[in-house]
Image (cartoon, rainbow, N blue to C red):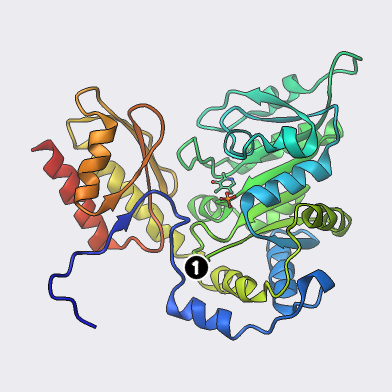
Amino acid sequence: MTTENSTPPVIDLRSDTVTKPTPAMLAAMMAAPVGDDVYEEDPTVRRLEEMAAARFGLEAGLFCPSGTMTNQIAIKAHTEPLSEVICEQTAHVYLWEVGGIAFHSGASVALLPGERGRLTAAQVEAAIRPENVHYPTTRLVCLENTHNRGGGSCYALDDLRAISEVAQRHGIARHLDGARIFNALVATGQRSEDYGQLFDSISVCLSKGLGTPVGSVLLGSAAFIKKCKRIRKVMGGGWRQAGFLAAAGIYALENNVARLADDHRRAARLAEALRAQPYVAEVLNPETNLVIFRLDDTQPAAEFLAALERHGIRASSFGPQWIRFVTHLDVDDAGLARVEAALAGLAA
Ligand SMILES: *Cc1c(COP(=O)(O)O)cnc(C)c1O
């Protein structure tokens, strides 16, 4: 197929959720053996759940359509009305999940200010409610790694251990929103197997940097996942021949993890290009695949995004004058060079 007046492909830096499955991933999906997953008869779903759980040193997994669903199911399973969840004030579970903690769980939220989204053990400990009839009961601490709003920031393992120790000492459950946990593992060299001791439940997105079209897995103990399966069902998330989608997840776990380092390298290059522009006031040092930066007052954000659009480049607004670029499977070095040229052109 040839096009005469071919326009270059759009470079979509809005999110790492925009990736399309590669031919090899699609082939794996089409070849998947499937069955009715509500009857627990889909062998591919079962394989994905077992494989993901084993990677993180946990017993069982639950494949779901979205990371919002896996997070909200976990929070509901760990809490009850009149209880409270501790999280960072810009956590995805609080900020970008439609107020689901109140809606699904009837729980209160204790919001803490983090350093690029990271909490400390001392902060968590200070937020735990003492026994008092006036207070909700603290039941859960929820961390996010990498932290989205914090610009893809990663926790050090020692800091996670310290928070985990505080939670265990107070009998509080530990959930990890690991939408981009593989970015954190690749960037820090941490081992996924160590996470099973640090958290009671982990949500992992397959549709972000790992490049599948749909899906997240929730991981935890066998008893916890059994409880979560009922909550998924009441949310309407019991699905049938989901193995076609699970096969994409298996393919991604086997093939798309190590390559996240390429996304991180490209994010670092984008940050460098941004720092060289006179109209960029501030760039958060990218630790993984997210680059968050602030335009100075001479460059209105809406105009900046419109100018990029004219070059076939898409990005997200992230608050007044703040923009987010995300690198992923569908952004290669040629695309990166086009972004660099467009950024330099805006300064001219
Ligand atoms: C994307 C994301 C999720 C889940 O998003 P869905 O679009 O519901 O899959 C959860 N947490 C974080 C930090 C995310 O970035």
Residue depicted at 74% across the width and 53% down the height: 196
Residue 307, x across and y down, in percent: 20, 42
Left or right, 186 with respect to 170, comes to left
Relative height, residue 151 to residue 265 (above, below): above
- Residue 198 appears anywhere in the view: no
- The residue indicated by pointer 1 is 256
Residue 148, x across and y down, in percent: 51, 41
Instruction: Tell me which amino acid carries mark 1.
Output: Asn
Residue depicted at 38% across the width and 60% down the height: 262
Q: Of helix, strand and loop, which one carries label 1?
A: loop
Left or right, 228 with respect to 92, comes to right
Of 335 and 164, nearer the camera is 335
Of 237 and 277, nearer the camera is 237
Label 1 CB-ligand 1 distance < 8 A: no
Residue 17, x across and y down, in percent: 48, 56
Left or right, 183 with respect to 120, comes to left
* Residue found farthest to the left: 348
